[in-house]
Image: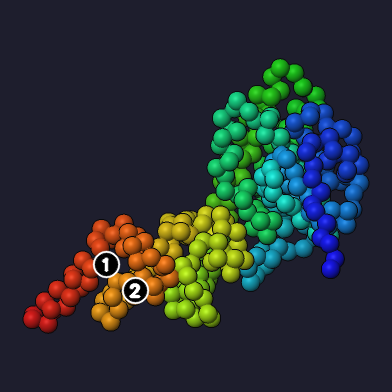
Amino acid sequence: MMKIKPAVHFKSLSALHQAMGLKPPLHPLISIIDYGQALFSPEDFKSGIQLDFYKISFKTKFSGKIRYGQGYYDFESGGMSFVSPGQILRMEMEEADYSGMSLHIHPDFLRSYAVSRKIKKYGFFLYSVAEALYLSEKEKKTMTTVFEAMQDELDERIDHFSRDVLISQIELLLTQSNRFYNRQFITRKAVHHDILAKMEDILQDFFNHEKGIRGLPTVESVASQLNFTPRYLSDMLRQTTGQSAQQHIHQQLIEKAKEYLSDHQLSVSETAYQLGFEHPQSFSKLFKKKTDMSPNQYRELIQKNNNGSAEF
């Protein structure tokens, strides 16, 4: 049995620069790497790399169209991807087929600034590379300006004001990235509605125990079947439907529960087990939280309404 090599772990920016054949960083906690100047082979890192710092990659040119879902899109001008400290990054051979740069920020550089807490709330740091931010030509120019301003600051003005200036530029970069991701969700609503339909099918498979599926559906299990990360799926759904993935799953679960309870064939406990709950109490608690009534109260209401309709 072939032993799988662990990811190459970089604890410092200096070590990363050295591995890429570059001069030491001008600042030990923040640097911008120009891929055009780096001397490395993706083959050297095929087992993956793990960084102890944030990595924001800005690809300024691709060799072809970007595949997204079942189609191709014309955001050929560039794209961005985001990696948090500790994540494993797989470097494929295609990584060498673009020009661009990457910003590396050690968490210590952000300490004592509000952005050190704010950066953890940006969901796109938990997206996969396949869920990258694709940029229009205008958006690419905006990002290029920010990266160039940061590089100028690192090249020429490392003084007592440099950190404050760089922090403000990082905040601008993150804000613009968040804005462009929201644009990406909006412009791809048609694609996302197709994904929503597939999600409905997956949930029905869970509830009906088709394909041998048992248990409650989770965001992780549904996202995996859709080939998305859980965070991207939630952010996409929030823009498309106004609900997170968890909220959407709960909504579908409650609708299915109402269907069972209206049928009068199953008891509340049997309904809970049919839906995938291990404990009926957990089902009753969720049902009441979402509908403001217990399963039995809902069943009585339905029966009363049906009797009322019959009398009318």
Give the side of residue 55 with respect to residue 244, left or right. right
Q: Where does label 2 land, which residue?
A: 271
Q: Is 209 in front, or is 309?
A: 209
Q: Which mark is residue 268?
A: none
**Which three-letter amino acid code belongs to the residue tagged 1?**
Pro
Q: Is residue 207 above or below residue 32?
A: below
Assign the C terminus to one quadrant of the image. Answer: bottom left
Q: Secondary structure at mark 2?
A: helix
Q: Is residue 61 above or below residue 201?
A: above
Q: Quadrant of residue 65?
A: bottom right
Give x and y (percent) for residue 240.
Answer: 47, 60
Q: Earlier in the sequence, mark 2 or mark 1?
A: 2
**Which three-letter amino acid code belongs to the residue tagged 2?**
Thr
Give x and y (percent) for residue 13.
Answer: 80, 36
Assign the N terminus to one quadrant of the image. Answer: bottom right
Q: Where does label 1 land, which residue?
A: 295
For label 1, the crowd category at 10 Å Cα-Cα, with few meaning under 14, some 14 to 19 and many 20 or more, is many
Give x and y (percent) for residue 16.
Answer: 83, 41
Q: What residue occupies the far left of the structure in this picture?
A: 311
Q: Is residue 74 above or below residue 162?
A: below
Q: Is residue 308 visible?
A: yes
Q: Is 26 in front, or is 190?
A: 26
Q: What's the residue at 55%, 42% (across, down)? A: 121
Q: Is 4 in front, or is 75?
A: 4
Q: Is residue 224 above or below residue 6?
A: below
Q: What's the residue at 53%, 81% (across, down)? A: 211
Q: Secondary structure at mark 1?
A: helix
Give the side of residue 261 with respect to residue 238, left or right. left
Structural distance between the alpha carbons of marks 2 and 1 = 10 Å
Q: What's the residue at 81%, 60% (across, down)? A: 4
Asked if disc 2 and disc 1 are in contact, CB closer than 8 Å, the reply is: yes
Q: What's the residue at 62%, 51% (across, down)? A: 126
